[in-house]
Image (spheres, rainbow, N blue to C red):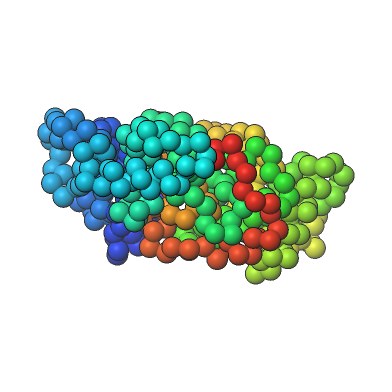
């Protein structure tokens, strides 16, 4: 709670324009009321204006200060269509296709961010990950020099915070990709005023099993040490080893990881997805994310089932991100990982 309060307070110092493509959703409208009242952000709701206004009235909300944008009737619709076509014309896109895409609120919202008419986007309450990630990659695109994007989850327990990556984008990342993901994630963790302690997780502890998967994680740890020597990182190691300082100190005193890991880098999407969902359900953690790492502008994803408070908190994170553009981790791995090649692109 202290962490989220800190993020909200920092967001309130310089509220940014955050666009919500699911502007007709009740939870988004209720969250917008809180966001507006507490001056966390400047919400922009996308959707049918008449529908949104009717719902605002029905819910007895006061959203006079909120901007409502209906894509097809927006003053910049044709301009956005032209820009979107230019971005995608060598990817099989026709002008008719571009116009159809920009009628979709998610694509229109991404274009608002790309054009600088919004500072960040919060979306995904009613959509699947691919439906949100694909337009983000197509429109906003990764930061220059970034060859891998990933999703980062934050889990807040009663007395500690853990971060898990990547449960969102990369099915079976290479050691080079994992290293870049770790560096990008560490930069994001630091933006929350938390010092990252990174563990490259496996079913092996420091060479106890010479399996390709374990060796991949060990190599990833070495790449991070080489490219970002200021980071505390080690691996490969088992999950219980990573989060148990007493195990590290007694059995592996040579480890450069001290105090237990708070940033857990998983070997693949499958293990990451299983881990964060088990921790959230059985461990009673508050779950936030995924936050897309390596993007030019803040792209924060919601998940179906998120409540109003979740939307408010994620919006505060997006504002905090927008207040500090850029990512120091980008250039450190630019020559290590291969060029971005994802099914979402």
How many labels, in total?
A: 0
Which residue is depicted at the point 80% across and 63% down? 254
Which image quarter holds the C terminus? top right
- Residue 337 appears at what percent x and percent y? 69, 54
**58, 99: nearer the viewer:** 99
**328, 33: nearer the viewer:** 328
Q: Is residue 25 above or below residue 45?
A: above
Q: Is residue 127 above or below residue 173?
A: above
Q: Quadrant of residue 49?
A: top left
- Residue 269 appears at what percent x and percent y? 63, 38
Residue found at the far bottom of this picture = 230
| 180 left or right of 249 in image | left
**156, 141: nearer the viewer:** 141
**139, 238: nearer the viewer:** 139
Q: Is residue 302 above or below residue 1?
A: above
- Residue 125 appears at what percent x and percent y? 38, 34
Res. 323 visible in picture? yes
Which residue is depicted at the point 78% across and 52% down? 218
Which residue is depicted at the point 51% across and 36% down? 92
Q: Quadrant of residue 257?
A: bottom right
- Residue 342 appears at what percent x and percent y? 60, 41
Which residue is depicted at the point 57% across and 46% down? 150
Res. 34 visible in picture? no
């Amino acid at each position: 709670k202290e962490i989220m309060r800190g993020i909200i307070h920092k967001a309130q110092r310089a509220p940014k324009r955050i666009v919500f493509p699911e502007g007709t959703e009740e939870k988004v409208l209720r969250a917008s009321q809180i966001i507006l009242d507490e001056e966390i952000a400047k919400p922009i709701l996308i959707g049918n204006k008449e529908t949104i206004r009717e719902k605002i009235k029905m819910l007895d909300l006061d959203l006079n200060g909120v901007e409502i944008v209906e894509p097809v009737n927006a003053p910049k619709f044709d301009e956005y269509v032209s820009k979107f076509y230019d971005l995608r014309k060598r990817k099989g896109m026709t002008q008719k296709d571009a116009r159809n895409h920009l009628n979709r609120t998610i694509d229109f919202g991404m274009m608002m961010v790309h054009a600088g008419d919004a500072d960040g986007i919060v979306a995904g309450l009613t959509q699947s990950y691919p439906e949100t990630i694909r337009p983000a990659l197509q429109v906003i695109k990764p930061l220059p020099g970034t060859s891998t994007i990933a999703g980062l989850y934050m889990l807040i327990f009663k007395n500690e915070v853990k971060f898990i990556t990547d449960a969102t984008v990369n099915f079976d990342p290479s050691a080079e990709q994992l290293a870049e993901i770790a560096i990008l994630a560490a930069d994001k963790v630091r933006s929350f005023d938390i010092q990252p302690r990174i563990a490259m997780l496996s079913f092996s502890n420091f060479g106890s099993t010479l399996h390709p998967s374990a060796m991949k994680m060990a190599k990833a740890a070495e790449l991070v040490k080489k490219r970002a020597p200021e980071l505390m990182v080690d691996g490969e190691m088992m999950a219980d080893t990573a989060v148990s300082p007493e195990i590290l100190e007694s059995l592996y005193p040579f480890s450069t990881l001290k105090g237990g890991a708070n940033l857990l880098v998983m070997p693949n999407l499958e293990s990451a997805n299983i881990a964060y969902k088990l921790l959230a359900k059985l461990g009673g953690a508050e779950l936030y994310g995924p936050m897309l790492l390596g993007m030019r502008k803040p792209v924060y994803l919601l998940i179906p089932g998120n409540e109003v408070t979740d939307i408010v908190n994620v919006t505060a994170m997006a504002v905090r991100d927008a207040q500090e553009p850029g990512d120091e981790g980008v250039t450190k791995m630019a020559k290590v990982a291969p060029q971005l090649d994802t099914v979402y692109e």
